[in-house]
Structure formats: structure tokens, C-alpha cells
Amino acid sequence: MSNEPDYTANEDNQPQVSVSDTAPLSPYSSPTPAVPPLTVEPTPAPICEADLWIEGLTLREKIGQLIMPRLPWQTTQLTPALHEWFADYPVGGIILFTDNVYSIQQVQMLTADMQAASRNMLFIATDEEGGRVSRIGRLFDNTTFPILPAYDIGRSGDPGMAYMTGRNIGQQLLTLGINMNFAPVADIWTNPANTVIGNRSFGSDPDVVGDMVYAAVQGLNNAGVLSTIKHFPGHGDTYEDSHYLLAVYPHDWERFDTVESLPFVRGIDAGVHAVMMGHIATPQLQNHEALFYWMEPWLESGTLPATFSDFWVQDILRGVMGFDGLVITDALEMRALSDNFTPAQVALGAFMAGADILLMPTNVTVTFDALINAYHDGVFDQQRLHESLRRIFWARQELMS
């Protein structure tokens, strides 16, 4: 870390971001003290702030913190019906799309009203990558510092440009009341036929992409927005678009270790808050387990999505790569999953694999019911649920610091 470049060095207004053994008794000490020692009760461990917050939640609120739906199509304000929906479904976050956005003042009012309607602070997220995936960029005048596609930034060879782009995007999002960005893209674009990634990637060179991801994450973080790298374990060399089909990563461990993994490692080193799991099968990288019986045919055929793989989430991302932040799914309504699994299977498969936030489930009601019923049935316990809630709590603390 100490050798990494500091992209904030020229900013005028930077955001403020041995045990010794007990000595043996003297040989002249009496083996039985004349006066019995005082009995001292051990000091109880302090209760973690996160645990205090969790204790104040109902089970339905706890489950709700795991779920991030989108708003109904073309919803641009908090209607009475939506206000009532928030009371019935105490979700932990909302993702906004272009149809929810038409002016700066409108988005500010929408986000403020949603926060007021929620008993707990909401993650309000969007995909603002710059380039062709831009939900809010048209609301701002970017003539002074144009927001370029990631691929153009990568070709510039200037990580400082990636940093400033991330920082400017973050400042725009905060102006609107949006506190989480599903960016930057950490995929390496090595398959020219892969149009779903394309120029959303910083390029085809792992080192260049890694440098740009590192800088972009720092820029977003220093603007005060939660950053997210995607789509783990790597969508850049797949052929399929997971919006419509399960994507397949066709390579072995040597390739993953020397190419696809590098930008994710760099993003984690930069302090990224979240990693988004892609709906990607890895037939040559098999060490999964079938967490549920319905996963077995997918496991046997080598097509189990990484979204449902505790091997990818727990063993590789959290274990080998040391990531301890939020794990977020890609949109669960995407046809890579929704064409092949029920909404309940999708919710439970992703959560049991290790996801903390379930993004855009096909059916929010079914997702709530599936998770609550699974908890009551002992499919997962309080410890597993609270693991995710603690990560969610500390991510919110980052926003308030």
C-alpha cells in the first residue's frame, strides 16, 4: 500500500478520509496465601455498535436490509402507495435508473423523501460508470471536465484522469442524495465479441485496468460515495450477455490468477466498499458445493453461476483475496438466473453463498417470504444473518464518517 500513488496529493480540499508472561512465584512464597485473593468478575466485552443496531431490528427489518429492489417503472416521487410499501417492505436500499431521473431537484426530493420514509438509512444506488452506462450524467454540465468512457480513460494511460472522473461522479451523486455507485467496472475486455462490457472496461491489459480501477475507487471513496467493483470473477472475456444468458468464463486458474483477478485485487487494495458478483459459470474452475439439491445438475455440468458459489464468494473473494466488505449480487431479475431458477431459489442460493445484498429480485414479496421462512426452518441461523447485517452497518458508518 505504501508504494501506491496518492491521487489526492494536489487537491486543495481533501476529504478527511508484545505480550510478556506472568512472572513465576518466588520459591519462598507460601503455597497457600494467608488471605484468599479477591474474586474479580471479568469485565464483559463491550457491545459492538453494530450489535446494538441489530438488536433493535425486527426479523422482518433484518431480512429487509439484505434486499435492494428498483422502483416501479417511471417512479419519480414518493407517492402514498410507495410510502405504504416501504412500511410493509423495510428494504435496505433502492437502485435508481434513468426512468426515475429527470431533474436535479426532482431526484433530490425523491431521495430525501425515501430516506425519511425509512426507519433505517437507505443505500440509494445507481450505475454511473460514465460512457454509455450513465443514469444521471445528463443532468450535469460536464464540459469543463468531460466524463469519458472507461476505455478512453484507460487508453490515456493516466490514472489521475480515472481518479478525477471517479471523484467528479461521486460529487454529482452526493448532490442528488445517491450514496452508492455500482462502478467502476473491473472486467478486462479481451473478447472483442463481448459487447455487454466493451468500452465499459478500462482496456485489455490487466496492469492498466488495475491501475485505473485503483484510482477510480479512490476517487469515488474520497467524494464520500460507496464504491463497487464488478463483475466478479470477470465478465470481460465471456461471450454471453448475462442479461439474457448465463455467461461462461472458459479459462483455467493460471489465466485467472494472472489476468482477471488483478483489477479486483487492486480495487480491494484501494479500499473498495463492495464487490458485485456476476452471473458467470466457470467450468474449468470447479471447487463448488451444491448448497441445495436443485444446484446439483448445474454443479455436475460445470454451469453453476458464481452467484450461487460459496467457493467463489467465501473461499476466493473473502479468503484468498481478503475482502471483508459488502458482497452484492448483480441484478437477480436478469435472465441468466430468472430463466433457470425460481425467485425463492435465487434469493436463497445467493444469500447462502455469501451475498450480503440481493439486488433487484424478480419478486420482492417472494424474496422476503423465502428468506424469513428459511430462517424459521433453520436453513440459516442468526449468526449467518448477523454477519451480513454487521457489514451493512459498517458500510453505512462509512457514509456518516
Image (cartoon, rainbow, N blue to C red):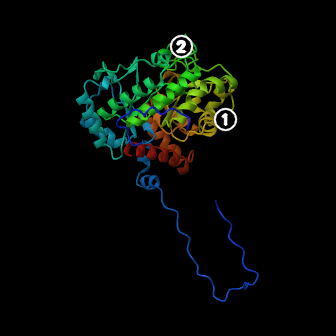
| Image location of residue 199, percent across then percent down | 47, 15
Residue drawn at x 42%, y 31% is 219
| Image location of residue 143, percent across then percent down | 30, 18
- Mark 2 lies on a secondary structure that is loop
Residue type, label 2? Asn
First in sequence: mark 1 vs mark 2: 2
- Mark 1 is surrounded, within 10 Å at the Cα level, by few (under 14), some (14 to 19) or many (20 or more) other residues, namely some
Residue drawn at x 48%, y 29% is 215
Residue type, label 1? Glu
Question: Closest to the observer: 338 or 393?
Answer: 393
Residue drawn at x 62%, y 31% is 295
Q: Is label 1 in contact with label 2 (beta carbons under 8 Å)? A: no
Tally of numbered tags:
2
Question: Would residue 322 be found to the left or right of residue 122 on screen?
Answer: right
Residue 250 sits in quarter = top right
| Furthest residue in direction top, as rendered | 193
Question: Closest to the observer: 206 or 229?
Answer: 206
Question: Would residue 92 be found to the left or right of residue 196 on screen?
Answer: left
Q: Is residue 340 visible?
A: no
Question: Closest to the observer: 93 or 300?
Answer: 93
| Image location of residue 400, percent across then percent down | 37, 45
**Marks 1 and 2, how far apart in space?**
29 Å
- Mark 2 is surrounded, within 10 Å at the Cα level, by few (under 14), some (14 to 19) or many (20 or more) other residues, namely some
Q: Is residue 9 visible?
A: yes
Circle 1 is placed at which residue position? 289
- Mark 1 lies on a secondary structure that is loop
Circle on res. 194:
2
Q: Which one is closest to the eye, mark 1 or mark 2?
A: 2
